[in-house]
Amino acid sequence: MGNPVRKNKDRWLGPLAIVLALTLWECYAILVVKNSFLLPTPPDVLSAFLELSQKGILLLDFQVSMLHFVVGLGAALLIGIPIGIAMGWNVKINAFMDPIIELLRPIPPLAWIPFAIIWFGFTTVSAGFVIFVGAVFPILINTYGGFRSVPRIFVEAGRMLGCTKNRDLIRYIAFPSALPSMVSGIRVATGVAWMCLVAAELFGVSNNGLGKNLWFYYNLHRMDCVIVYMIILGLIGLAIDMAFRYYIDRYFLKWRTGEVA
Amino acid sequence: MGNLEIRDLSQSFPREDGTELTVLDHLNIDVQDKEFVCILGSSGCGKTTLLRLIAGLDTARAGSILLDGEEMKGPSSKVGFVFQEYSLFPWRSVIDNIAFGLEMKGIGREERYRIAERYLELVNLTAFRTNYPSELSGGMRQRVAVARALALDPVLLLMDEPFGALDAQTRNMLQTELLDIWEKTKKTIIFITHSVDEAVFLSDRIIVLTPRPGMVCHFVTIDQPRPRDRTSTEFAQVRRHVLDLINQKCSIQ
């Protein structure tokens, strides 16, 4: 497995599986289902994709959805990280906040949709709010956990080297020590946010958006277009996760290379 | 300067049943400037507690600690500490670990790297300046920890069994290197160990503590010239003397 030559040799297996799956899908749709409404074939989906891109609608949907995503995730970062830090660093704040957090956390984000609509109307903020509710808890909990488990020896080593103020200890010791945990929380949060995005858009907070138009084409019974949106949603979700795996981990956490972590 | 006076130092911790567990009992120790002192004692005798009190990481129940006549309250840049476990910041490269204390002091990047570089050279790790601690061996990590503690130019260096986790060869090598560094920098060093061999090899004076509660049992002055030969008769005599102290006079009555 660890052998790089062997790994290179096996690289064609992944694409092969995709080709096989597409072929299987095509055969099943043509030979068994025989109904392009119940199961469109891959060529149906491809032509739907071309049709939609000619309309120029996909790019706009992508932009609107990314806006919702960025608003929701941004708010989750802005609120989740400071609260997580405060709770992880200060026992009193933790004791004060913990019951509220634990009561709010199990409420599914989508259950907030009615209030999102009556508070913020059919707006970007409304969609952002639902995404925020989904994303904030993984960020908060992992930030808290990271700060809670800062090894005592790092804090003491810092104090012996003149890092004695709370603000400095947080900035120079606790924050970098907690960063791996925070990053994995943010990574989970992006996944949850992406799921909430589709649900948030189904309720017509905007005229465009990947989730919005997925639902729109369902209402038109254009299932080929629905699949186009499903695939795009999946690919963007994958791209976000890859960005974490290959860029953020390597750039921010390069000091962990060589560790068995 | 680095004169340390410990006066009537006592430390105790509350036990679950409400009584107090006395760890250190009216300890009196004087350490001269530039002296290399080893504190020996069986585990649990309060060696680490004592060192943490001197460092200012904990507060004593009673008594005082004076460094050059000044009472110690909390961590000070005049005191450096090398921990038993690996205490390097894993997210900082070797050079940035060494420069950490200088950075906290507000010294500019160029100046602090220039200083850190000097200490990197002192511990013979110039080739590893940009490596991360996870890429270093145990012995190298402790050498970086020594450099990091020295970079602030403290007068007193406290070392809490710094070589305890290392294999015998590396340990002997680092002991020799430490003496070399001590010759060059002339710090007062208080070194905790439970290895008699290490204590006899390194120190000007050994302080043997009694088991809990920790009290000074005996001072042993070693005036053999350095480098000391571990296999010599004189060395063995001192070792036997110290071992006898630990096993008889300074053990539980």
Image (tube, grey):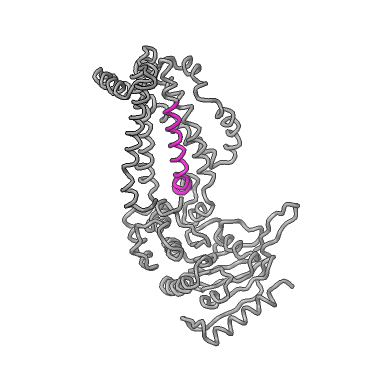
Image quadrant where residue B251 sits: bottom right
Image quadrant in which the C terminus of chain B is located: bottom right
Residue at point 48%, 14% (across, down): A118
Q: Is residue A157 above or below residue A10?
A: below
Residue at point 49%, 59% (across, down): B86
Q: Please, which residue is most extreme toward the top here?
A: A220
User: For residue A177: magenta?
Assistant: yes
**Left or right of A207 on screen, residue A121:** right
Question: Residue B164 placed where, x, y %?
Answer: 53, 67
Q: Is residue B179 above or below residue A244?
A: below
**Left or right of B25 on screen, residue B106:** left
Is any atom of residue A114 visible in this view? yes
**Left or right of B94 on screen, residue A47:** left
The magenta segment is A170-195
Residue at point 48%, 33% (across, down): A80
Question: Residue A7 placed where, x, y %?
Answer: 34, 49
Residue at point 40%, 47% (across, down): A253
Which of the pair B189/B248 is nearer the observer?
B248
Q: Is residue B159 above or below residue A38?
A: below
User: For residue B63: magenta?
Assistant: no
Question: Residue B191 placed where, x, y %?
Answer: 54, 69
Is any atom of residue A66 visible in this view? no
Q: Is residue B3 above or below residue A94?
A: below
